[in-house]
Image: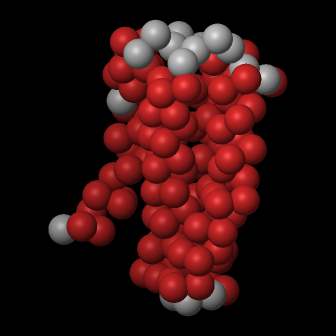
Amino acid sequence: MFRIFFWLLPVIDVFELKRILSYYSSLGINIPKRHAQYGMLERWIGYLPAGLVLGMLLDLKMVFIIIAGIFALVGPAEFYLMYRGVGPWKFFRGKSWTVVSKIFLMEAYNAIGYYILGALIALVIT
């Protein structure tokens, strides 16, 4: 049953984008729809295939270690840039630390889900 949720993650993300943006808006962050669509595209053509390739080349334990390592290295820098409102995250400028951290953690959870989904697909097909 648990695997079914991993398979449904991208489908839920696609059909619930409007609801996700509505929730972020209730937190006081108006994320442009185009930005959210590009983020979804990034997950579909970046995170999912990366998890798939890693899952084909390595065992699942090593995939989790690599994913945790990447997020430990990149996560703090990305959070800082989001909080400062730099680059594609201009709409975060001036927002509170707690609101930005909520959204950052939800998006990180989602990205990790795509990596893991790719790795699980690799387990199924290999």
Q: Is residue 55 above or below residue 50?
A: below
Residue under the point 66% across and 26% down: 83
Q: Is residue 22 above or below residue 108?
A: above
Q: Is residue 58 left or right of residue 81?
A: left
Residue under the point 24% across and 67% down: 2
Q: Is residue 111 above or below residue 86?
A: below
Q: Indicate the quadrant containing the N terminus: top left, top right, bottom left or bottom right.
A: bottom left
Instruction: Give the camera-side residue of 25 and 101.
Output: 101
Q: Position of residue 61 (x, y in %)?
A: 51, 85
Q: Quadrant of residue 93?
A: top right
Q: Position of residue 15 (x, y in %)?
A: 37, 31
Q: Is residue 1 above or below residue 48?
A: below
Residue under the point 45% across and 40% down: 106
Q: Is residue 11 left or right of residue 77?
A: left
Instruction: Give the camera-side residue of 35 and 24.
Output: 24
Q: Position of residue 126 (x, y in %)?
A: 52, 88
Q: Position of residue 44 (x, y in %)?
A: 59, 48
Q: Quadrant of residue 87?
A: top right
Residue under the point 48% across and 24% down: 99
Badge count: 0
